[in-house]
Amino acid sequence: MRREERDLIGVREVPEDVYWGIHTLRALENFPLTGIPLSSHPELVVALAAVKEAAALAHMELGTLPGERAGAVVAACREIRAGRLHDQFVVDVFQGGAGTSANMNANEVVANRALEILGHPRGCYEHLHPNDDVNRSQSTNDAYPTAAKLALYASAGRLLDAMTVLRDAFGDRGGRFAKTVKLGRTQLQDAVPMTLGREFDAFALTVRDDAELIGLAAASLLEVNLGARRSAPGSTRTRASPGWPSPTSKPSHPCRSGPPATWWRARRASADSSVSPAPSVSSPYGCPRSATTSGCSPRAPGRASARSGCRSSRPGPASCRAR
Amino acid sequence: MTPEAVNQVCFDVIGADAAVCAAAQAGQLQLNAFEPLMVHHLLNSANRLAAACRLLAERCVTGIETDEERLRALVERSAGLATALNPVIGYQRSTSLARECRESGIPVRELAARDGLLTDGELDELLDPWRLARPCQGPTT
């Protein structure tokens, strides 16, 4: 079974049982480059869903998207964030268009799942449209980079956790070898004696210092550009609502506490004082924190700020062409 | 072999870094169109480094033990010990000892005692490995 979908270029058939649509189909044909699908980066899939959910919630708050549709989009996004439908993110990780294919893949999967939730068949975009509704007031060039930053932030959190494990392992051996004397070596020759404990402690410190830099870099990922402003206000591609207050850049990120710590600012802060420079943060993405001596990454995993998604499953007319 | 595997992750990340740099510097005006490559490599690299850190910690560092006798023997046979005699017998004589130690394989301590440069007691103190390893802390008590 296949269903027909239409875009500016023409009409194409997509398999009935997939959640993606015609834009994803075009991307599959246009960018057969690595064979690695977007789903190989679950963090990115989850982050794209988080961006779509944040946008829908903002629209719900502003009344710029009908509540029923927004609720279905939110519900679909939460399913994806919980790990469902990842196999539907099929576009190649490499693509032209600065992420348009990834963004459209997300829009189509969210739209079709939301349609199901609303009781409509997949592809019946007159009820809920990938561009007009799921991507509403967004552009690839704010949605995709925002998702990328969230995904990287999650990855950085996991990396910091792992670095903590490695640092602690070195530190543990450093303590154990505190009284073990060995020869230092420089230029591949014998140098003066030292303890093996100091050598391992130095490894631990190196890992800790690197983790601190990663924590600082990760903190700068929290400055996101979501909110329908790419380069041209009023750009037709953004479909920004009149009086649009960039809602998704305002309330969306529970991570945000205080101004973004840019790299140089954090560097200067750490040079100026011994106070930990990066803001402490906590988010559903497994936030890294600035690594201190007590631990590289005390993560605070958890769900996004809970806002109830209006889940609706009214049966609707199946007026779409399917064959 | 674990460190060899970890090294390969590092080489991979260094390559990814080069690709990301090329993509980042190719951005034009208001948009960098090469973000998909950057995201792909950055996510891969962060995840692979995380796996490598855990692997190194769990399969290599945790529980690693030493051969203390061999470490001590390496210290005692090292020509580098002559450095410790430097403040007492002077640079010229200590470097001569180091050279002779390297050529003959005879420990610095034996050579110094043979030449009557220092007493056994002085050598004991000056060449105490624990003291040498912690020069700031003075002799052990």
Image: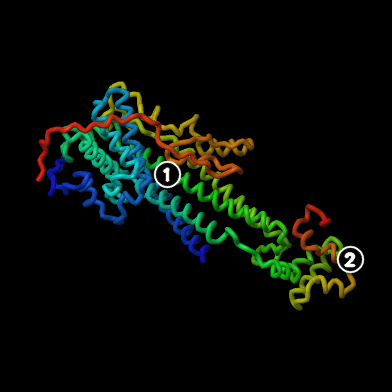
Q: Is residue A182 above or below residue A14?
A: below
Q: Position of residue A255 (x, y in %)?
A: 45, 34
Which of these two is toward me, A306 or B70?
A: A306
Q: Position of residue A64 (x, y in %)?
A: 27, 24
In the image, taking residue A295 as reference, residue B105 lies left or right, namely right
Q: Which residue is mark 1?
A: A152
Q: CA distance from mark 2 to mark 1?
A: 62 Å
Q: Is residue A91 above or below residue A262?
A: below
Q: Is residue A267 above or below residue A257?
A: below
Give me the residue at 55% from left, 53% from top: A166
Seen from this angle, which residue lies furthest top? A243
**Dot 1 falls on which chain?**
A
| Three-letter residue code for mark 2 | Gly
Give me the residue at 62% from left, 52% from top: A171
**Colour theme:** rainbow
Q: Position of residue A244 (x, y in %)?
A: 32, 24
Q: Position of residue B63 (x, y in %)?
A: 59, 60
**Dot 2 falls on which chain?**
B
Q: Which residue is mark 2?
A: B121
